[in-house]
Amino acid sequence: MGAKECIASGKAVLGIEFGSTRIKAVLVDENNKPIASGAHDWENRLENGIWTYSLDDIWTGLQDCYKKLAEDVQAQYGEKLVKLGAIGFSAMMHGYMAFNEKDELMVPFRTWRNTITEEAAAKLTKLFNYNIPQRWTIAHLYQAILNGEEHVPDLKFVITLAGYIQWKLTGEKVVGVGEASGMFPIDIATGQFDEKMVAQFDQTVADKGFSWKLKDVLPAVKTAGEEAGKLTAEGAKLLDPTGTLQAGIPLCPPEGDAGTGMVATNSVAKRTGNVSAGTSIFGMIVLEKELAKVHEIIDLVTTPDGSLVAMVHCNNCTSDLNAWVNLFAEYSELMGMKVDKNDIYGNLYRNALNGDDDCGGLLAYNYFSGESVTGFNEGRPLFVRTPDAKFNLANFMRVHLFTSLGALKTGFDVLFQEEKVEVDEILGHGGLFKTKGVGQGILAAAMNAPVSVMETAGEGGAWGIAILASYMIQKGADESLSAYLNNKVFAGQKGEKMAPKASDVEGFNKFMKVYSAGLTIERAAVESIQ
């Protein structure tokens, strides 16, 4: 079936993901091949000390993204989007959206980027003997309780961004198990929120006299392959205000960007791993067994089908890199040169390969915001060098690429060196890997493991959630998600694998010694520059 016929017959599948800086829609055919796309750029804002997006940002962004997808379909195939085979929604994991019984958002949406729940995260980690990161939904809820915030007694339910979209479009308060695992710990045996820990939480806050119990305010949890609601008439109008899109389309469980990243890189099986590198960066390895002990810089989440995953999540990755590239672009314009931004990125990134293995003694920190892996609640982007450092453009770009992986490397060293976790291959996806061989080679050096980038790596999470929506309607009776990915999505697909170069591994390790020692400089900057 051709793409035009697939669209006309209502069998195309739509995936939409809310990333940190872009909302992206991908339409796929029955073979999960992307056939159209749309996007809307957006940006979070810091308001009253909270990183947030407004509800208006969310809906105008979604509608503009969908409109651009529909326009792309019309332009390419002369068809209108009237019916779809299935839809999937994904978004940045974690965060806190709290609603009352009138379905009103009681406080501004608190995104994953906030590092304001240190006390709650520490207390819950001790209570559960299970690492609760600051950005998890339960940490935000408990911190609001500890702060005595006025909205908490009126709480009706809490949800993530992906779950919020799903609720508004289907009427169902539901999240996928991978997304759920970033809200509250999951019992791997049941695929549901851990009942023992739920009871511990309720007991801990019992003296507050709230009318609600935790289980009452959390969403339902679904696993990949299950249906999680149908598009209502109201939901269809929210997505497509023109009224062209019909109601009744099934939706798969909404997932976080971690889960869609695993799907998009075919890394949901044990001993596989992936790294998603964009505004933030996180790396995940699907575990063969539970970790020996609790590590506060290692998150335990799940794949969309419920397998245990160790995740290192870092708030900062390419923002400072992008800022420097923009500076070079501005310089080019000042000199009267019209250079394509992609060419600037490509040339600067490739030139980094000409630098010294250890960046020539240069040091940088890319901390736009706090970085819990290294113990920071706030960040200050920094570039530092000694007078005798080898200061040239190649080393300058190399150190900014290296430091974008610095916090991630800190966490992965715990997994590889302390927990002796083994991984056969790491798959990279996201903006850091767009320039062929550069980010990929540097990640291989940082992890000291082979790194592959698939041909479809640029499709990202929107494609990943579209695949999950396709899996829901296409899977065989007993077909696992891993089997579906291997046989129906990635069969015969080419990927480029890079083994780590010994000199690069040694250079990255040298850089990390300087990076670790120099954290006192970053701390002084946070304390001194307000």
Image (cartoon, helix red, strand yellow):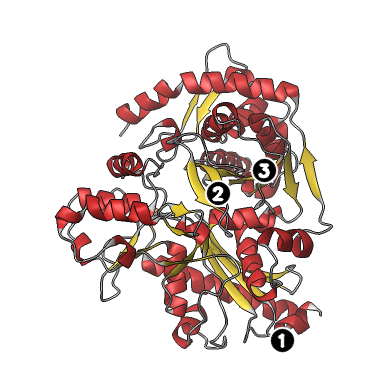
Q: Which of the 4 image quadrants contains residue 108? A: bottom left
Q: Say what amino acid the circle numbered 1 marks.
A: Ala
Residue at 62% from the left image edge and 87% from the top image edge: 82
Q: Disc 1 on helix, strand or loop?
A: helix
Q: Which residue is mark 1?
A: 8
Q: Which of the 4 image quadrants contains residue 380? A: top left
As measured in the structure, the alpha-carbon distance from the residue carrying label 3 to the one carrying label 1 is: 41 Å
> In this orientation, which residue lies closer to the viewer: 253 or 36?
253
Q: Say what amino acid the circle numbered 3 marks.
A: Arg
Residue at 55% from the left image edge and 38% from the top image edge: 324
> In this orientation, which residue lies closer to the viewer: 395 or 497?
497
Residue lying at the far top of the rendered structure: 388
Q: Disc 2 on helix, strand or loop?
A: strand
Query: Which numbered disc flags the more N-terminal residue, 2 or 3?
Result: 3
Query: Which numbered disc flags the more N-terminal residue, 3 or 1?
Result: 1
Query: Which numbered disc flags the more N-terminal residue, 1 or 2?
Result: 1
Q: Which residue is mark 3?
A: 271
As measured in the structure, the alpha-carbon distance from the residue carrying label 2 to the one carrying label 3 is: 11 Å
* Residue 92 percent location from the top left of the image: 49, 56
Residue at 56% from the left image edge and 39% from the top image edge: 321
- Quarter of the image with the C terminus in it: top left
Q: 398 above or below 362? A: below
Q: Which residue is mark 2?
A: 308
Mark 3: few/some/many CA within 10 Å (<14, 14-19, 20+): some
